[in-house]
Image (cartoon, rainbow, N blue to C red):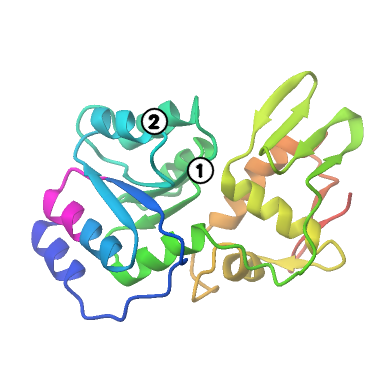
Amino acid sequence: MTTTQNTRTMNTNETTPEVPSDKKRILVVEDERTLAMGIRDALVHAGFDSEVAYDGDSGLELASSGHFDLVVLDLMLPGRNGLEVLKGLRKHDHKIRVLMLTALSEESHILQCFEAGADDYMSKPFSPRELVARIGAQFRRSTGEPDAAPISLDLPEGISVDLARLEVRRDGEVLLLTPREGDILEYLIKHHDKVVTREDLLRDVWQYRNPNVATRTVDIHIVGLRRKVEPDPATPTLIQTVRGKGYRWYA
């Protein structure tokens, strides 16, 4: 995105979307200073605390400090790129939420981000209202069910899941779930009595205002989740695909 586009995008007069009442701390890692400051100002206006880093090295250092609830992370950065920052962060913190910004729309780049542990992504250019809404959605659970999902469950072949700790144990190894993977698994478990559509997940888990957006976000996350919880990810038996409709939890 050019500087002109950045200024025009961030200076819209759109109404600020609703965000959670408890103030969250957001780190913006973006090397285009006009855009970074515009994002920070939009977040502060929406009720978040926000700080900015302009390169990958300082971004990783700040993100690893434990003082932030979410990182808005650009993919193309000087020094460490966004993917390297994400991988470095996930080595010791799998619970902080990460939203990637990218001007690269190729599916391979998006897949790399999700495989490295990103919770969501947005393509440039974007509106500040949509960015704030997507960040706010990261902190909300809107499953529509009053009863809590199981905190832990035992699966076939000795696999166990602890949703509170975002951990999967299999073959003596601990696999870490990202926050978004935990959200998806909780939603599928709560709605085990029906087929969950891709639109259901986009609306209720991601809280996209338009659940019909053209994105493979759900598909990519399901693939990653199956790799962690399925006895045989190539032949899934727990998160089953219902052809032409969506997914269903069969445990």
Give the residue type that dot 2 points to.
Ser
For the N terminus, the quadrant is bottom left
Question: Residue 37 location, x and y as percent?
Answer: 17, 55
Residue for badge 1: 114
Question: Residue 237 location, x and y as percent?
Answer: 86, 46
> Residue 64, which numbered label?
2
Q: Dot 2: few (<14), some (14–19), or many (≥20) neighbours within 10 Å?
A: some
Q: Is residue 31 magenta?
A: yes
Give the residue type that dot 1 points to.
Phe
Question: Residue 148 location, x and y as percent?
Answer: 77, 59
Residue drawn 58% across and 41% down? 178
Helix, strand or loop status at disc 1: helix
Question: Residue 22 location, x and y as percent?
Answer: 46, 61
Q: Is residue 49 visible to the viewer in this orientation of the structure?
A: yes
Position of 58 compared to 83: left or right?
left
Q: Which residues are magenta?
A: 29-38
Helix, strand or loop status at disc 2: loop
As displayed, is residue 180 above or below residue 125? above
Which residue in the rendered view is the most extreme toward the front?
22
Which residue in the rendered view is the most extreme toward the top?
172
Mark 1 or mark 2, which is nearer the start of the sequence? 2
Q: Is residue 53 magenta?
A: no
Q: Is residue 233 visible to the viewer in this orientation of the structure?
A: no
Position of 234 compared to 128: left or right?
right
Position of 141 compared to 189: left or right?
left
Residue drawn 37% across and 31% down? 65
Q: CA distance from mark 2 to mark 1?
A: 19 Å
* 222 vs 181, nearest the viewer: 181
As displayed, is residue 89 above or below residue 224? above
